[in-house]
């Protein structure tokens, strides 16, 4: 997709109203509610905290981006803000409390501030993988209803975000060496993030009957999908980048 297509994609998404029926969460079994509310509150913090990059992108000088990419990135940040509002409604509907700080959120913020724009975007890519797989796992266990539908919608957004950030890296024009460095960095970061999330949300996974191995498989499948956006040997055609013309 061209950056102008991404811009249109996010502009269209922005018109969606907030989902209804999240304030009561009656369909969610009572014993699941405290753990689910605590997990969603943690994710709510993460979704709400990505505003800084929307300002930095105007000054950033990196290959492969243009005014449409910059506009799309700001719209992407707004879409994450929308996720935060939806998750906030869910947390309240489940009888939980929103958080001011959390150790995993601080870790992600630290990662985002660590280095340049590309590292920040790699951390965001990890957040898409973590969010996409975690929301998908929760939705797979929730009974039919507003919460499940809203999580499925967010999950679909995260899949698009993954493709959007993946396309940024695919357009950096890197040679084999930089691609290999990126792959090493990506797998280290993504696996570390997966470990953190599995540790922090183990109670929710256990309560909702989601086996650890199922969660690991869901995470790994998206980590691999993100890695395939920037295959090490793409110039030689050894691997195909999903969905992108070469
Ligand atoms: Fe999100
Ligand atoms: Fe996202």
Image (tube, rainbow, N blue to C red):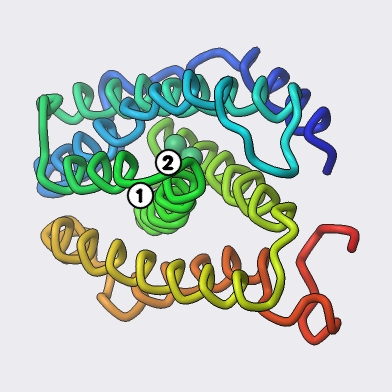
Q: Position of residue 132 (x, y in %)?
A: 46, 52
Q: Name the image quarter holding residue 233.
A: bottom right
Q: Along the line of sight, which residue is nearer the eye, 231 or 158?
A: 231
Q: Is residue 20 left or right of residue 109?
A: right
Quarter of the C terminus within the rendering:
bottom right
Q: Earlier in the sequence, mark 1 or mark 2?
A: 1
Considering every residue shown, the one lying at the far right of the view is: 245
Q: Position of residue 52 (x, y in %)?
A: 39, 23
Q: Which mark is residue 142?
A: 1
Quarter of the N terminus within the rendering:
top right
Residue found at x 82% / y 76%: 235
Q: Along the line of sight, which residue is nearer the eye, 54 or 215?
A: 54
Residue found at x 42% / y 68%: 219
Q: Name the image quarter holding residue 212.
A: bottom left
Q: Is residue 223 left or right of residue 235?
A: left
Whether ligand 1 has any atom under 8 Å from the Cβ at mark 1 is answered as no
Residue found at x 18% / y 30%: 94
Does the rendering let one see residue 187? yes
Residue found at x 23% / y 43%: 110
Above or below residue 202? Residue 2 is above
Q: Which mark is residue 148?
A: 2
Q: Secondary structure at mark 2?
A: helix
How dense is the environment of label 2, judged by Cα within 10 Å: few (below 14), some, or many (20 and up)? many
How dense is the environment of label 1, judged by Cα within 10 Å: few (below 14), some, or many (20 and up)? some
Q: CA distance from mark 1 to mark 2?
A: 6 Å
């Amino acid at each position: 997709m061209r950056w102008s297509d991404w811009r249109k994609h996010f502009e269209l998404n922005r018109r969606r109203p907030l989902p209804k029926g999240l304030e009561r969460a009656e369909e969610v079994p009572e014993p699941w509610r405290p753990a689910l509310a605590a997990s969603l509150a943690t994710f709510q913090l993460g979704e709400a905290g990505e505003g800084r990059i929307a300002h930095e992108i105007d000054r950033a000088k990196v290959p492969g981006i243009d005014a449409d990419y910059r506009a799309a990135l700001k719209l992407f940040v707004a879409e994450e803000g929308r996720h935060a509002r939806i998750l906030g409604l869910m947390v309240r509907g489940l009888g939980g409390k929103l958080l001011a700080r959390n150790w995993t959120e601080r870790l992600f913020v630290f990662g985002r501030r660590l280095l340049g724009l590309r590292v920040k975007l790699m951390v965001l890519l990890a957040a898409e993988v973590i969010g996409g797989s975690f929301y998908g796992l929760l939705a797979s266990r929730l009974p039919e209803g507003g919460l499940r539908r809203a999580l499925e919608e967010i999950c679909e957004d995260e899949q698009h975000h993954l493709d959007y950030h993946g396309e940024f890296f695919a357009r950096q024009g890197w040679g084999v060496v930089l691609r290999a460095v990126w792959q090493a960095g990506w797998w280290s970061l993504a696996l570390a993030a997966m470990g953190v999330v599995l540790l922090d949300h183990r109670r929710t996974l256990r309560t909702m009957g989601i086996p650890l191995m199922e969660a690991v498989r869901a995470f790994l499948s998206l980590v691999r999908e993100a890695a395939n956006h920037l295959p090490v040997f793409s110039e030689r055609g050894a691997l195909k980048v999903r969905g992108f013309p070469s």
